[in-house]
Amino acid sequence: MNVMYFAWVRERIGVPSEDVQTTAATVADLVEELRNRENRYAAAFADVSALRVALDQELSDFDAPLAGVREVAFFPPMTGG
Amino acid sequence: MTVRVQQCSFDAGAELNAFSQGDGVGAVVSFTGLVRDLDGRLHQMEIEHYSGMTEHAIKGIVAQAQSRWALDDILVIHRYGVLPVGAPIMMVATKSAHRADAFAAADFLMDYLKSRAPFWKKETTADGSTWVAAKDDDEAALERW
């Protein structure tokens, strides 16, 4: 699936998006998998309460299942307006 | 309904005049957000957005406003990219027969655009660049709706 990062999450991980092959069942499982990869992921996902997630461009939550999802995006709380 | 997500600047006055045309319009409320100087320290503001999601998310917020209030039309313009001090960032305008609906819908739209539209602001000063943090108040503001 395509995994995207925005704002400081993108800066900490170092890429705006990447293809991730995973069998993670939920967003939380995917986060755990990424955290164990490298320090830059561990740094970005140190506190998931500071993060939001969108699945296929709709806001979702960390308990949500990933079955059938093509695009996951992680970002800090939005600051529009 | 008009939703525009764009890099280029816009003329809020001209937009408002064009939006206000038409017979039977009783009330127009508008809000324009500008890049605020930080006591002369701000060099620029950069706005990042999630291009695949932004317009869709804003249209969802606009649809909620249309279902809650009696509105003739809604305009939302939101910019992204590098913006200098004083530049317009975004604009919301609502049109209705009566002011109460126009005011309430504009207020609702602003609260939701702040916390539910995928934009992130970064401020650059002489000290460097920092991402603007969302405030607890922003999230709390949604609960009043």
Image (cartoon, coloured by chain):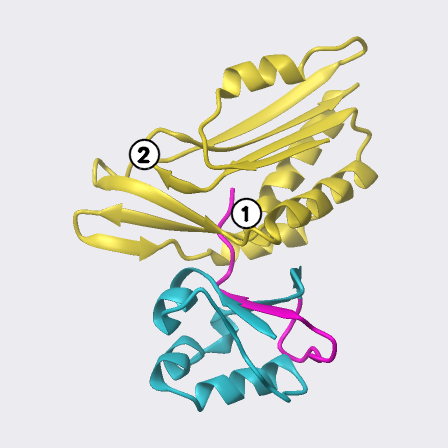
Is B45 on the left or on the right of B111, as rendered? left
- Residue placed most toward the observer, B143 or A58: A58
Q: Which residue is mark 2?
A: B84
Q: Nearer the viewer, mark 2 or mark 1?
A: 2
The N terminus of chain B: image quadrant: top right
| Tag 2: amino acid | Pro
Which colour represents chain B?
A: yellow
Q: Chain of mark 2?
A: B
In the image, what residue occupies the spot 69% across and 79% down?
A66
| Tag 1: amino acid | Lys
Picture layout, residue B54 above or below residue A53 = above
Using the rendered view, name the quadrant where residue A67 is placed.
Answer: bottom right
Using the rendered view, name the quadrant where residue A44 is placed.
Answer: bottom left
Q: In the image, which lettered chain appears cyan? A: A
Q: Pinpoint residue B143: horizontal percent, then vertical percent.
A: 66, 54
In the image, what residue occupies the spot 45% across and 31% down?
B8
How crowded pointer 2 is (Cα within 10 Å; few <14, some 14-19, many 20+) is rated as some
- Residue placed most toward the observer, B2 or B123: B2
- Residue placed most toward the observer, B139 or B131: B131
Residue range (magenta): A60-81
> What's the magenta bit mostly, secondary-structure-wise?
loop
Q: Chain of mark 1?
A: B
Is B133 on the left or on the right of A75, as rendered? left
Q: Which residue is mark 1?
A: B114
Query: Judging from the image, what secondary structure is the residue with disc 2 in?
Result: loop
